[in-house]
Image (spheres, helix red, strand yellow):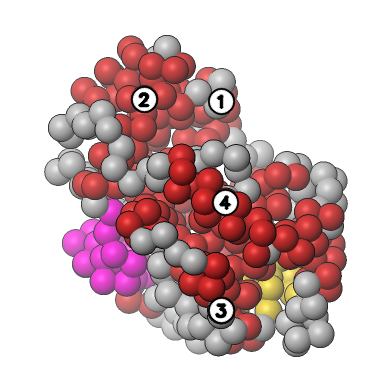
């Protein structure tokens, strides 16, 4: 496997190390702790910062059993149904991308009964029904988002313009620079959107989907008084999916990394083992060349082991599995009960 320096330059690593040391100096949270951060933890310090003290203590002591127990209680655990869905999708993609040899190698390394049919993927009719409804109900909001996002623009500028266009600034919402990390996130209790400093839009469509997820769904539901739950991430992903003309899995590789590291097939894995399997899966899906697949696999695996220890099998953060799992359950519900306009609007933003 390629080293960390193959993906992040020396300057970035030095910055991450400095952030880690600053993080540890917070004596109000860590009065007597000497934290041992893995390289994968350093890649996303802001997410590590959100771990509870008991999880951090379990990480420091390298107590994998305690860490897994606490993680399952806080975020839940990935399951075989989600893994089977992804493997079935890989089987379908391998026929399209002519990567049967890679798929065979993947299956040799994962203990799973191969099921060629996906179960949670919505029918074309179901997807099109909700896609049209989504774009009709939120036509003006989506137009505001799209008209304020351009390649080369900073995320801070785009978010501010969109929030002003949606009237959120007048409703008391504010924008602040994210303290750490590279993520855009919401703190509903503070009515604040945190944006990464110095991050610029390189893919317009991806940025539009992200802002629909964060500003339309999360901010919309907080504004309407709906308390946050992990299942809401499935709704956010739904908003992203409905910007496409056909159904596409989202966060599947992220779920795959967590599920393989966790060991839902009975085989807990370390960073290197998960990385190789996610790299194979990325090549099978076929949207990246070998170099791109390596970078994607590295980043997804790093997120899975964030806060844990990359050399200990099963020492993974399960929070990122929530997105894919919640989205699968949501599509199953949407297919079984076709919502009307009022129900669907209430689902997305918490009000009819």
Depth check, mark 3 against mark 2: the one in front is 3
Whole-angstrom CA distance, mark 1 to mark 3, is 41 Å
Which residue is at the front of the view, 281 or 98? 98
Instruction: Identify whether 86 is placed above or below 166.
Output: above
Whole-angstrom CA distance, mark 1 to mark 4, is 27 Å
Residue assigned mark 1: 288
Q: Which of marks 4 and 3 is nearer the N terminus?
A: 4
Depth check, mark 1 against mark 2: the one in front is 2
Q: Which mark is residue 131?
A: 4
Q: Which of marks 4 and 2 is nearer the N terminus?
A: 2
Residue at far front of view: 340
Depth check, mark 4 against mark 2: the one in front is 4
Image-based side of 288 in relation to 322, left or right: right
Residue assigned mark 3: 352
Depth check, mark 1 against mark 3: the one in front is 3
Task: Tell me where residue 4 appears, x and y as whole percent.
Answer: 53, 38
Which residue is at the front of the view, 208 or 187? 208
How would you classify the magenta stretch by its main secondary structure? helix
């Amino acid at each position: 496997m390629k080293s960390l320096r193959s993906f992040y330059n020396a300057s970035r690593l030095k910055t991450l190390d400095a952030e880690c040391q600053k993080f540890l100096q917070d004596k109000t949270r860590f009065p007597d702790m000497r934290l041992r951060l893995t390289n994968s933890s350093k890649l996303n310090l802001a997410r590590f910062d959100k771990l509870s003290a008991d999880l951090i203590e379990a990480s420091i002591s390298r107590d994998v059993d305690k860490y897994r127990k606490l993680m399952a209680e806080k975020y839940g655990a990935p399951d075989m149904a989600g893994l089977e869905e992804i493997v079935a999708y890989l089987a379908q993609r391998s026929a399209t991308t002519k990567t049967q040899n890679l798929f065979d190698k993947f299956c040799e390394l994962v203990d799973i009964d191969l099921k060629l049919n996906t179960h949670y993927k919505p029918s074309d009719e179901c997807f099109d029904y909700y896609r049209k409804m989504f774009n009709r109900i939120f036509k003006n909001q989506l137009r505001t988002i799209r008209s304020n996002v351009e390649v080369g623009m900073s995320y801070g500028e785009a978010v501010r313009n969109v929030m002003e266009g949606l009237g959120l600034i007048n409703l008391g919402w504010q924008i602040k620079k994210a303290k750490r990390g590279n993520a855009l996130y919401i703190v509903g209790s503070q009515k604040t959107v945190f944006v990464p400093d110095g991050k610029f839009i390189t893919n317009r469509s991806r940025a539009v989907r992200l802002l629909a997820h964060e500003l339309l769904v999360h901010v919309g539901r907080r504004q309407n008084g709906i308390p946050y739950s992990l299942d809401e991430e499935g709704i956010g992903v739904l908003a992203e999916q409905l910007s496409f003309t056909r159904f596409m899995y989202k966060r599947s590789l992220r779920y795959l990394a967590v599920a393989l590291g966790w060991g839902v097939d009975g085989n807990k894995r370390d960073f290197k083992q998960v990385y190789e399997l996610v790299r194979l899966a990325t090549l099978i899906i076929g949207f990246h060349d070998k170099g791109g697949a390596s970078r994607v696999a590295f980043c997804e695996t790093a997120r899975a082991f964030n806060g844990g220890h990359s050399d200990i099998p099963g020492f993974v953060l399960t929070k990122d599995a929530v997105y894919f799992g919640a989205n699968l359950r949501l599509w199953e519900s949407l297919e079984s009960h076709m919502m009307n306009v009022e129900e669907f609007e209430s689902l997305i933003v918490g009000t009819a």
